[in-house]
């Protein structure tokens, strides 16, 4: 049976007080809508249709790399109207799963249970019980505990307002039934909108037993309407990821102060200090230590590596036993071999550094191939850019680069070569030799420092 997924994402989100469409606000570094799309994709549906409205072109362009159908709801006439607008996209589907672009943490396990209930009926609904159900549609059941209808808060009686089981809006339904029920709903209610939830009473009227499923937590079905709710779900999500890391063998200095904005895989005995941020795909091997305020994106960190405080590592590979920082920046396309030392205020970009090499202080190494057991002194710069093109610097094994040297690429420093401190190297340096370029040192004994003249 073919499955179509509808994601309602047309709301303006006025309470966010933002020019950014609500469904594009980030949670864990990813738009709310992207979370929902990824969860839906796990079911391999025949199509995913996003119903958009406010800020539609921005929403479409942000998710342009996804294989999505788009349906514009030009008039905001309610959730029922939104689904009616999308019906032409569902003609070849047998089942429909209806989700919401501002409910980002709905889990695949819950939706799988919901779809399983659809196999027993033509309509399955996700409901949840809240201590404070204010603002939500109430689930009305009969004496046999069967669902009979959903009543929106503005239309509810005093007795119905006392009900604490509420509608999440998420449902799975037979497409043929859905189309028939939508044709019968009206907007005779306080909001003068076409409510999707009105199909519940129509299903009961047609003798269809409405199945229901409950999520594992209320946060899973929590919608985001303002920035406070967004912040709450962000911390809830991050705490879940922190718990997973600790279960996998990592120690966290403070589980409330770590942010995972992608996928983080950890080995055993990993330690992560406060305020570390992980983005994209990151792997931390056994025994890795991450210092406070580190930002690591799309990187593989080898066994026993120590990342000291305030380092930034992006699209790079750090070999086992290496030591990075503090205040180091390792930029994309960098690969460090085993036991490399990168010290404070060092920046490395698009370079390969061999085993046991050291770049300990205040240096820039870009577009370079550095051999093993190389020592690069403080203040060294590989001058890789001529204003138009980038050029490579090659430093051979066991070379020693004196402090405050400039290596003007393209240039080759031979194996075992020594570059004297304060040199500007513009030609290849011979292996196993000393190369330096310095102005002759002079002392002018008759020179006097200028003296500031008194003001007149």
Image: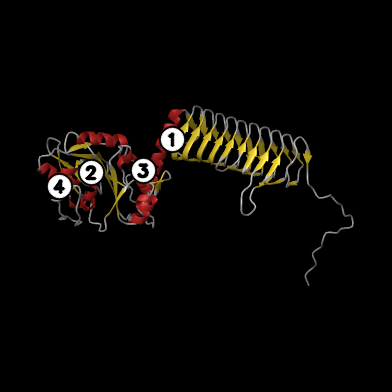
Lower position in the chain sequence, tag 3 or tag 4: 3
Q: Depth check: 403 or 367 in front?
A: 367
Lower position in the chain sequence, tag 4 or tag 1: 4
The residue pinned by badge 3 equals: 35
Outermost residue toward the right? Answer: 446
Lower position in the chain sequence, tag 2 or tag 3: 3
Q: Depth check: 360 or 349 in front?
A: 349
The residue pinned by badge 4 equals: 181
Q: Position of residue 51 (x, y in %)?
A: 28, 51
Residue 265 horizontal side relative to residue 33, left or right: right
Circle 3 SS class: helix
- Residue 141 seen in render: yes
Q: Depth check: 224 or 406 in front?
A: 406
Q: Position of residue 236 (x, y in %)?
A: 38, 40
Q: Which one is in front in this view, the residue at disc 4 or the one at disc 1?
A: 4
Circle 4 SS class: helix
The residue pinned by badge 2 equals: 167
Residue at point 37%, 57% (across, down): 17
Q: Position of residue 269 (x, y in %)?
A: 51, 27
Quarter of the image with the C terminus in it: bottom right
Residue 236 horizontal side relative to residue 258, left or right: left
Q: Position of residue 293 (x, y in %)?
A: 54, 41
Lower position in the chain sequence, tag 1 or tag 2: 2
Circle 1 SS class: helix
- Label 1 and label 2: CA atoms lie apart by 30 Å
Mark 2 nearby-residue class (10 Å; few <14, some 14–19, many ≥20): many
The residue pinned by badge 1 equals: 242
- Label 4 and label 1: CA atoms lie apart by 44 Å
Q: Which one is in front in this view, the residue at disc 2 or the one at disc 3?
A: 3
- Label 3 and label 4: CA atoms lie apart by 29 Å
Residue 223 horizontal side relative to residue 359, left or right: left
Q: Depth check: 110 or 454 in front?
A: 110
């Amino acid at each position: 049976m073919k499955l179509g997924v509808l994601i309602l994402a047309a709301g303006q989100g006025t309470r966010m007080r933002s020019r950014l469409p609500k469904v594009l606000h980030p949670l864990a570094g990813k738009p709310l809508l992207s979370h929902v799309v990824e969860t839906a994709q796990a079911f391999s549906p025949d199509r995913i249709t996003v119903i958009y409205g406010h800020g539609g072109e921005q929403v479409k362009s942000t998710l342009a790399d996804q294989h999505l159908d788009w349906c514009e709801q030009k008039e905001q006439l309610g959730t029922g109207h939104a689904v009616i607008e999308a019906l032409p996209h569902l003609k070849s589907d047998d089942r429909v799963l209806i989700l919401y672009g501002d409910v980002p943490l709905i889990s695949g396990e819950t939706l799988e249970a919901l779809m399983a209930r659809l196999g027993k009926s033509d309509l399955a609904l996700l409901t949840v019980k809240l201590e404070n159900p204010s603002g939500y549609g109430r689930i009305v059941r009969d004496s046999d505990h069967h669902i009979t209808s959903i009543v929106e808060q503005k239309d509810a009686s005093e007795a119905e307002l006392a009900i604490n089981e509420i509608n999440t809006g998420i449902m799975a339904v037979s497409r043929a039934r859905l189309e028939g029920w939508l044709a019968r709903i009206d907007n005779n209610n306080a909001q003068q909108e076409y409510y999707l939830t009105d199909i519940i009473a129509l299903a009961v009227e047609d003798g269809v037993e409405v199945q229901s499923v409950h999520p594992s937590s209320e946060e899973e079905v929590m919608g985001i309407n303002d920035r406070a709710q967004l912040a709450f779900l962000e911390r809830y999500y991050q705490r879940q990821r922190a718990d997973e890391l600790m279960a996998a063998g990592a120690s966290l200095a403070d589980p409330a102060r770590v942010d995972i904005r992608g996928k983080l895989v950890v080995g055993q005995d990993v330690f992560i200090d406060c305020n570390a941020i992980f983005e994209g795909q990151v792997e931390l091997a056994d025994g890795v230590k991450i210092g406070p305020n580190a930002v690591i994106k799309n990187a593989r960190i080898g066994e026993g590596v120590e990342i000291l405080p305030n380092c930034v590592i992006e699209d790079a590979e750090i070999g086992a036993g290496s030591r990075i920082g503090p205040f180091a920046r390792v930029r994309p396309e960098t690969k460090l071999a085993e036991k490399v030392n990168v010290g404070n205020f060092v920046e490395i970009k698009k370079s390969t550094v061999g085993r046991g090499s050291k770049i300990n202080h205040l240096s820039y190494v870009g577009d370079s191939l550095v051999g093993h057991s190389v020592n690069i002194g403080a203040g060294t710069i590989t001058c890789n850019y001529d204003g138009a093109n980038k050029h490579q610097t090659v430093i051979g094994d066991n070379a020693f680069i004196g402090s405050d040297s400039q290596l003007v690429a393209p240039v080759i420093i031979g194996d075992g070569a020594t570059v004297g401190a304060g040199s500007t190297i513009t030609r290849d340096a011979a292996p196993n030799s000393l190369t330096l370029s310095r102005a002759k040192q002079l002392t002018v004994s008759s020179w006097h420092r200028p003296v500031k003249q008194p003001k007149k």
